[in-house]
Amino acid sequence: MPYTSAFVAAEVAFVHAGVKVYHVYRDDDMEQGPRPWDFGLREETGDGEGFDVRELANWSEPAHPPYLLGDDDTPENRHAWERYHTQCVEARHAERIIREAVDAGTVAEPCGCRVAPGGPMVPCEDHHGEG
């Protein structure tokens, strides 16, 4: 049976200082969900074309509970990990890091699209007028 694939704009992860930050999807397939650390400055930013928040200059690891190994495998630490995941600590941390980088003007995609300090998004030559 024939089927079709259609371009669908990526979802906006958040907007900060007038800059839209978009989710990037594994294999460009929305059904696989957004990548947790990869984002884009353009709605059509594909998998492998955006930026990895962990590579931004202001990146720091989010604080997390002790790993559940040996003596640290306790009910308290198991509950702490449940809270960590329920409260979306990593996603909120990534957003905070990107917001700080937007303010500093240190966010860029490999193509050259970038953010000026405090916004706005400055498209590269190939994407001039998009975003």
Image (cartoon, rainbow, N blue to C red):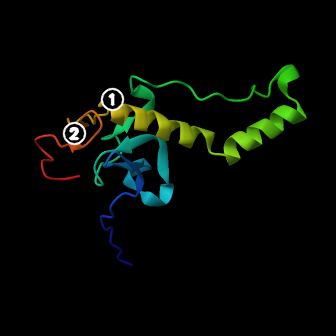
Instruction: Give, as a three-letter code, the residue at label 1.
Output: Ala
Residue at 49%, 37% (x, y): give it.
Answer: 96
Query: From the viewer's perspective, is the residue at label 1 or at label 2 nearer?
Result: 1
Task: Residue 36 in the image: state x and y as whole percent.
Answer: 50, 42
Q: Is residue 38 above or below residue 130?
A: above
Q: Which mark is residue 104?
A: 1
Residue at 55%, 42% (x, y): give it.
Answer: 92
Residue at 32%, 33% (x, y): give it.
Answer: 107
Sequence-first tag of 1 and 2: 1
Q: Nearer the viewer, residue 38 or 93?
A: 93
Q: Is residue 48 above or below residue 60?
A: below
Q: Is residue 12 left or right of residue 127?
A: right
Task: Residue 20 in the image: state x and y as whole percent.
Answer: 33, 50
Snapshot quadrant of residue 8:
bottom left
Snapshot quadrant of residue 51:
top left
Task: Residue 122 in the image: state x and y as whole percent.
Answer: 19, 41
Quadrant the N terminus occupies: bottom left
Q: Nearer the viewer, residue 118 or 68?
A: 118
Q: Is residue 28 left or right of residue 33?
A: left
Q: Is residue 102 left or right of residue 129?
A: right
Residue identifier under label 2? 113
Q: CA distance from mark 1 to mark 2?
A: 15 Å
Please tell me how crowded label 2 is: few (under 14), some (14-19), or many (20+) other residues with Cα within 10 Å. Answer: many
Instruction: Give, as a three-letter code, the residue at label 2.
Output: Cys
Element type at mark 2: loop
Task: Residue 5 in the image: state x and y as whole percent.
Answer: 33, 67
